[in-house]
Amino acid sequence: MKYADCYSSNLKRYLDGNQISSNSLANKSKISQKTIWVVQAGKSVPTVNTVQQISKALDIDGRVMLGRELTFDELKQTKKIGKILDLLVGLSPDDLASIHSIATAFSSK
């Protein structure tokens, strides 16, 4: 699945799960309702600026929404996951290998 498709699917799931209308998101993000609709419907690839504005308006991390389709519970954690990603960027390869081992152990539970 392409990044834009994952984002569209995740955005729709997040909005539906929180009962947020595209009109409400448009007002809060200062993005046109048409742009919100076409991104959510998967008819347009969002720009980085659009993803950032939507993320800020919804208090989520759009980077996490690009990788794969997420459950609603996973979507609610994108902000925390994004903060962890920011910390990981500065780690050494050995530290990253250790973190990978730990994360793998947790994910297999």
Image (cartoon, rainbow, N blue to C red):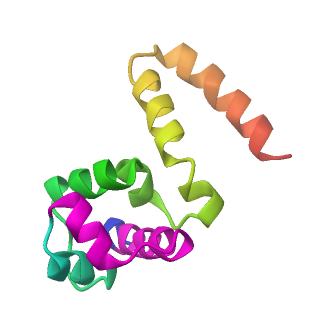
**Percent coordinates x, y for residue 89 in the rendering:** 39, 24
Q: Residue at x 42, y 49 (%)?
A: 60
Quick one: 22 or 85, which is closer to the camera? Answer: 22
**Is 70 inside the magenta-drawn segment?**
no
**Residue 90 rendering spot, x and y as whole percentages:** 39, 17
Residue 35 x, y percent position in the rendering: 16, 76
Q: Is residue 21 magenta?
A: yes
Can the viewer see residue 80?
yes
Query: Is 58 left, or right, of 17 in this rendering?
Result: left
Range of magenta residues: 5-30
Mainly helix, strand or loop, the magenta region? helix
Q: Quadrant of residue 29?
A: bottom left
Residue 12's place in the image compared with 100, above or below, is: below
**Mark count:** 0
For the N terminus, the image quarter is bottom left
Name the residue at the right extreme: 109
* Side of 15 where 22 appears, left or right: left
The residue at the point 49 percent across, 67 percent down is: 14
Q: Position of residue 16 (x, y in %)?
A: 50, 77
Judged left or right of residue 45, residue 85 is: right
Q: What residue appears at the point 54 percent right and 57 percent down from the top-left corner?
A: 75
Q: Is residue 71 visible?
A: no
